Amino acid sequence: MPFGLDGVEIGLIIVFLCLFAGIMSGFPVAFAIAGAGVISFAIIAALDSAGILIHQAIDTSSAEYATLIRDGVAREAISIFRYPELPRAAEALFPQGWEMAMDRNIGFIVNRMNERVIAGASIETLLAVLMFVMMGITLERSRIANDLLTTMARVFGPLPGGLAVSIVIVGAFLAASTGIVGATVVTMGLLALPTMLRNNYSPELATGVIAASGTLGQIIPPSIVIVLLGTLAGDIYSTAQENRAAMVGCSDALTYLGEPAVVSVGTLFQAALLPGIFLAFLYGAYAFGFALLNPSKAPAVLFADARPTYTTRRDALTWYLAVPVAIVLGGVALGLAGVIGSQDVVVSSYSQAGETASLRTNVSEACQAAMIDLHGQAAWDAAVAQQATIDASGGVQQARARTAEELIEARSLAIGGAAPIGTGVATLFLGLGLVLAVARGVNPLAEGRPLAIGAAGIVLAFAVDVLLLGPLASSGRTFLLLAIPMAITGYGVWFAVKRLARNELISVVFPPLVLIVAVLGSILGGITNPTPAAALGAGGAIMLAAYRKLSEEGRGGGWILLSTLALVVMMLLGMNFDLRTGLETTSGGDRVALVVGQVAYHAAFLGLLYACWVLLRTGVLGPVVRETAKVTSMVFTILIGSQLLNLVLISFGGEHYIQDFLRSYDNELTVFLIVMLILFVLGFVLDFLEIIYIVIPIVGPVIYGGTFDPKWVTIMIAVNLQTSFLTPPFGFALFYLRGVAPASVTTGHIYRGVVPFVLIQVVGLAILWLFPSIVTVVPNLLPNN
């Protein structure tokens, strides 16, 4: 064996050197990865054919190996790292020859491309990548960052380090609206860096905060990293847990875990929300603390062209804080009191099936012992007691058709338990109340009667819902009776919106904020999965950019606003009416709603086409489409190339060799720490795409095959991968910033500037490690899809 190394170890070194050389060669990464796979396979095959590479495998025919099997040790758990004293047998890396390995690889690559790129179950989720990229590029081309940076600088500039803090806020905002790291860093570098330098900001702080804030798009949803990681994590976690269950003698993961072994991209978006906000807070806290300790390097800045304000401190506390908090807390209190809640009285014509025990107890002795070890003796005893009670009552009751008397009784109970005010009505009108309150705070000296009339409309809506709209009211009756309160409220909201539009901060933040809420709210609320939400985001970004272009030309965007209103109408109709066609019986109200919905749909579609024409005429749509095609093509080409490289590792046993090494550690925390350190180091030389598609499939079966929460594991990896954009010398964010920085800013300034933020990343990872509930609390509170 050359250098005393095993043949598999030499093969791994060859693959890594070929990959590193391919990436450093200057060729496009997507093609360099595939080329590294082909070249490394050729080198390993040649050395193996020459008899140079020999693998010292465990001799499965030895008495010692047979003893381990008789003692109940699973074959998958036996490795040269865990049992180094076992007899070895020398064999070639390709026992059946490299020709057979290549033939098998070709078959595997075709199957994997079909599953993961062409027609697999994850393709629908991967489509979200394309539309999120398009959404981000469109918003970036609409100069949203320019307006945000200018406005936030005026708001926070007078504070110590205010410009740096404003950069963090804008970076977080752009992360939630675009998620494109390169575009965010370049835009903020062009717009903010010269301003910060002119105002005597330290070049290190200025470049560091811009580069770090630009990378927040890697973790704050909607994040392309989360989408790509989620598609892999779902498959890897499910397979790893099935293998784990089989190793302990259980029939499947559901039996062993007591819950399905699934994790979705939507759930990961929920899990990433708090960590992303937390990292942004750490960045801002560092910038503010740096300014307090070094006031000359991050001075306060006053802008002479700031618009005057009519809001006193007392007015701001009242209308921006006290009243909105009272509205929200009041809604929550009424919900807890049962005044606000569901008014659904539809009952199933079938009885509910009887509940089963918390754990399956009809399992083998080996599985029982494993389940007790996993869940604890108390949980097992409780499940046994539950099953005994179920058996004593005749077993699990199956669902059956209810009798007429049972249906009447169930419906009566549902009517009696319905809340006086529906959740939908309360959410809509309380939200409009927040708009009225904020508008009052923008200019307390203006006429308050229109806003008061709008508030009266909200009170009237609640009164109508309590007095005239019971749980048995039809959708048509509800729609008609609430039309008058809605019109009165809309009168006040119309004046409120006009007043808000005159506020610089709100007029800049509100349009993209609505888009973010619509996209993330539908995902985080469990309403839909990321792909339809991404489509909504892309369409909304196109209409927002078109409206902005029309405004710059001095033309009205009435058609864009009309199509947006049509979308709102479609959502309201969908929530209040049954719009399905082909039903045996359809009420008159549903038929009218269906016609109105069709008109709204065509209005929204025509508005989207008009927005595309505006962007095409102004030269925006073409670059957006080309850039979107470039980014998504790169992602999918890297996906294909990485599959080829992974199959090369599998062909000579490299993947299993690494997994056996990691499994040789008895402590899961140790294994995960090793993996996180490896990912951190690889972030110095590899992009996040290469790490996701090359490294995660190798180490994933180990780190996802234990007891850790898969959401926590995935978010920890995502935060770690974020450092790949920051770590010198090959951090992509550093190259992006270097390309747009003035000559007075050196590469040394940029490197020194990002070091504190890399350390903040490490601190953030440590906090998430110690307090995993930061990751899991939001998914536990919100519905999962």
Image: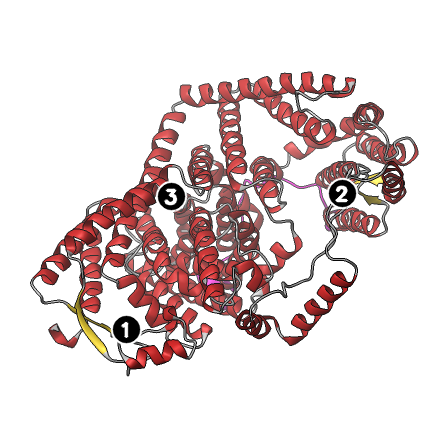
Residue that carries the numbered disc 3 in the rendered image: 116
User: Is 424 placed left or right of 268 in the picture?
Assistant: right
Q: Given the image, on which type of amino acid does mark 1 rest? A: Thr
Q: Amino acid at mark 2?
A: Arg
Q: Which residue is mark 2?
A: 400
**Which residues fall within the magenta stretch?**
291-315
Camera-side residue: 95 or 196? 95
N-terminal-most mark, 1 or 2: 1
Question: Mark 1 or mark 3, which has the lower sequence index?
Answer: 1
Disc 1/disc 2 C-alpha distance (Å): 55 Å
Query: Which-is-in-front pick, marks 1 and 3?
Result: 1
Of badges 2 and 3, nearer the viewer stands 2
Q: Nearer the viewer, residue 163 or 7?
A: 7
* Place of residue 427 in the rendered image (x, y in percent of width and height, measured from the top left): 75, 40
Spot the residue most to the bottom.
85
Element carrying mark 2: loop
Amino acid type of the residue tagged 3 in the rendering: Arg
Label 1 sits on a secondary structure element that is loop
Label 3 residue SS:
helix
Q: In this picture, is 727 found above or below 229?
A: below
Left or right: 673 with respect to 583?
Answer: left
Residue 284 visible (yes or no): no
Q: Do residues under tags 1 and 2 come within 8 Å of each other at their CB atoms?
A: no
Q: Is residue 24 above or below residue 371?
A: above
Per the model, the C-alpha gap separating discs 2 and 3 is 41 Å
Mark 2 / mark 3, whichever is N-terminal: 3
In the rendered image, which quarter is residue 58 located in? Answer: bottom left
* Image: 753 above or below 446: below
Question: Which residue is denoted by mark 1 in the rendering?
Answer: 60
Would you say residue 142 sits in the magenta stretch?
A: no
> Residue drawn 42% across and 67% down?
759
For the image shown, how many numbered marks are present on the structure? Answer: 3
